[in-house]
Image (spheres, rainbow, N blue to C red):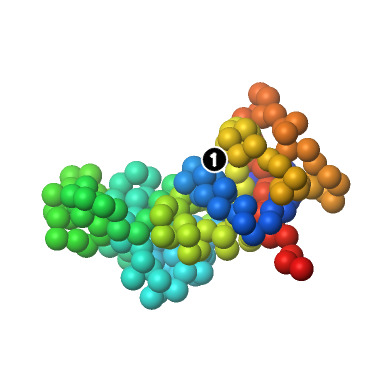
Amino acid sequence: MSQKSEDLLAAELQIMVVPGRFSRFSQLLQQGIILWKETGCSLRSFLHDQLRLSPQFVEENIQTIFLDGKPVDDLDRVHVKDGCTLALSAALPGLVGATMRRGGYYASLRAQISHGPEGEDAAASARGFVTLKLFNKVADVVGKTFLQDGFFVKRKNLEDFIRWSEPTEAVQASLEGKPFDLKAFRAGNSGDDLIRLRIILEPQE
């Protein structure tokens, strides 16, 4: 992505939902939320230091990792770069899942498509955009944190989500502190523009 921090939409769209409705946002996690993070580091460092995932959680719960569409086995020899797409998942079912599992018994079967090791200076350290996709148990456990911390999403993806989720009185939105009608949202001709978005849980009484 060519947009940089000074070009981003300053206003942040906030969507407040009751806790019982939070699961509907799993679609955004699967499509990919866009984070503005420090890049150029190893994948292991990115998971621990930028995404704040504990080493124990990574080792015990993230069995399948794709970086730019290629499965990853060695977290220390692969680097996260500006504009990349990172997908994290727990173990996938069946033979395909076993084959894609990092460091698994069948990993050698996909050697030609796996993400190969890179040199130590493979990427310069800099702030950049990373598209993060979360699936199954990984999304269930840590997805809510990323949504509440705030992220970017493409306008067209947000429009698709709003159309699919059919906002109700249980979902309220605001832009720059003013009420915002999600049903009236349209991507128009700027579908690839980024929207700053934060999901907020409505306080329980």
Tell me the SS state at disc 1: loop
Residue 3 place in picture, x, y as percent: 61, 41
State whether residue 84 appears in this view: no
Residue 101 place in picture, x, y as percent: 25, 57
**Residue 68 shown left or right of residue 23 in the figure:** left
Q: In this view, does 152 lie above or below 101?
A: above
**Residue 121 shown left or right of residue 2 in the figure:** left
Q: How crowded is mark 1: few (under 14 residues within 10 Å), some or many (20 or more)?
A: few
Q: Is residue 9 above or below residue 159?
A: below
Amino acid carrying label 1: it is Met
**Residue 137 shown left or right of residue 144 in the figure:** left
Which residue is located at x 52 percent, y 49 percent?
26
| Most distant residue in the right direction | 178
Residue 53 place in picture, x, y as percent: 47, 69
Q: In which quarter of the image is the N terminus?
A: top right
Which residue is located at x 31 percent, y 61 percent?
63
Q: In which quarter of the image is the C terminus?
A: bottom right
Which residue is located at x 75 percent, y 45 percent?
169
Q: Nearer the viewer, residue 129 or 161?
A: 161
List the residue tagged with mark 1. Answer: 1
Which residue is located at x 40 percent, y 71 percent?
57
State whether residue 156 appears in this view: yes
Quadrant location of residue 42?
A: bottom left
Residue 35 place in picture, x, y as percent: 56, 53
